[in-house]
């Protein structure tokens, strides 16, 4: 394999990425479970961690320390942009410490909140936003005009007709209901503008609050509003794996 001035022993790079001890990483290489740029690696190989695409058992290993992967809990009222010309509160107001040029993966409209992934990895951004990869997204919505009819879930799972074509939920469940309000969870693979709000409107239950709780394998969890955290190597690998399997 190519050996640049910045090349390091493959087992050292794997160990530094948290795959395991150097001895354990040597064993993975010996058992042909590691590939570099699509080719099976062998003991003695050197790689440039900034450019090599390294995979273990088919899962991507993040070795480029210049790449940033962030999960953010976007508050309501914040626009999903990093350079808003209108001077509105934006993502950059929460991420000023980062010098890299970052990209938000998909959008949440200003009135919505919850999980938003942010990165400077163009390959991952493309995989998570391109329609053909179809990464699942889970939302918790507060809706009105309750109580919900029993067939609402069946309607959404079968598909509803919108002005720009049909839309179908992958999963739907009623979380709880109090009077005319209810909380529902809906899982979708597509990301058309205001898709959840429009689907719930189509079945007669307008959304009053919308929170995205997951994108693929990444969960919002207890991340505070306006807060962010760095994704682990395992989480990044899981994102790549899910995108490639869809």
Image (spheres, rainbow, N blue to C red):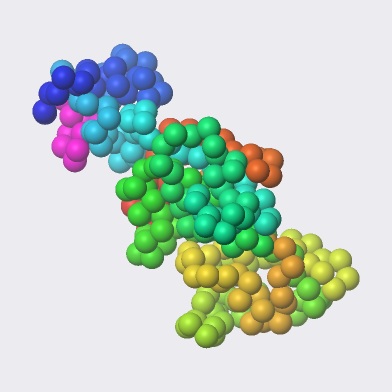
Q: Is residue 124 left or right of residue 10?
A: right
Q: Residue 44: x, y in percent?
A: 15, 18
Location of residue 95 in the rendering, given as x and y in whole percent from the top left corner? 55, 39
Can residue 214 be spotted in the picture? Answer: no
* Residue located 56% across and 48% down the image: 91
Residue positioned 32% across, 48% down in the render: 123
Magenta span includes 40: yes
Q: What residue lies at 48% left-to-right and 57% top-to-bottom?
A: 106
The residue furthest left is 2
Work out which quarter of the rendered image holds the N terminus and state it. top left
Q: Is residue 147 above or below residue 112?
A: below
Q: Where is residue 8 in the image (x, y as percent from the top left)?
A: 22, 18
Q: Identify whether 76 is placed above or below 200.
A: above
Location of residue 41 by image quarter: top left
The answer to whether residue 131 shows anywhere in this view is: yes
Q: Nearer the viewer, residue 46 or 228?
A: 228
In the figure, is residue 194 to the left or right of 45?
A: right
The residue lying toward the viewer, choosing from 178 and 118, is: 118
The stretch of residues the image draws in magenta is 31-42
In the depicted structure, whether residue 90 falls above or below residue 232 = below
- Residue occupying the far right of the picture: 179
Q: Where is residue 65 in the image (x, y as percent from the top left)?
A: 37, 28
| Residue 133 lies in quadrant | bottom left
Residue nearest the observer in this picture, 183 or 208: 208
The quarter of the image holding the C terminus is: bottom left
């Amino acid at each position: 394999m190519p050996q640049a001035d910045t090349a390091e022993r493959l087992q050292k790079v794997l160990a530094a990425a948290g795959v395991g001890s150097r001895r354990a990483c040597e064993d993975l290489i010996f058992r042909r479970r590691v590939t570099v740029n699509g080719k099976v690696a062998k003991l003695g190989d050197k790689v440039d961690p900034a450019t090599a695409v390294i995979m273990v058992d088919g899962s991507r290993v993040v070795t480029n320390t210049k790449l940033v992967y962030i999960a953010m809990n976007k508050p309501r009222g914040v626009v999903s942009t990093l350079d808003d010309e209108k001077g509105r509160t934006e993502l950059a107001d929460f991420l000023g410490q980062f010098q890299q040029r970052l990209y938000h993966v998909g959008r949440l409209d200003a009135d919505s909140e919850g999980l938003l992934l942010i990165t400077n990895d163009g390959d991952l951004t493309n995989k998570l936003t391109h329609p053909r990869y179809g990464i699942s997204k889970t939302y918790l919505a507060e809706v009105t005009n309750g109580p919900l009819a029993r067939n609402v879930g069946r309607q959404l799972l079968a598909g509803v007709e919108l002005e720009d074509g049909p839309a179908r939920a992958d999963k739907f469940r009623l979380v709880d209901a109090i009077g005319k309000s209810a909380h529902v969870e809906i899982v979708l693979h597509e990301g058309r503008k205001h898709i959840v709000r429009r689907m719930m409107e189509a079945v007669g239950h307008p959304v009053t609050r919308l929170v995205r709780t997951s994108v693929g394998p990444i969960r919002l969890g207890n991340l505070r509003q306006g807060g962010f955290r760095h994704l682990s190597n395992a989480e990044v690998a899981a994102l790549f794996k899910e995108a490639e399997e869809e």
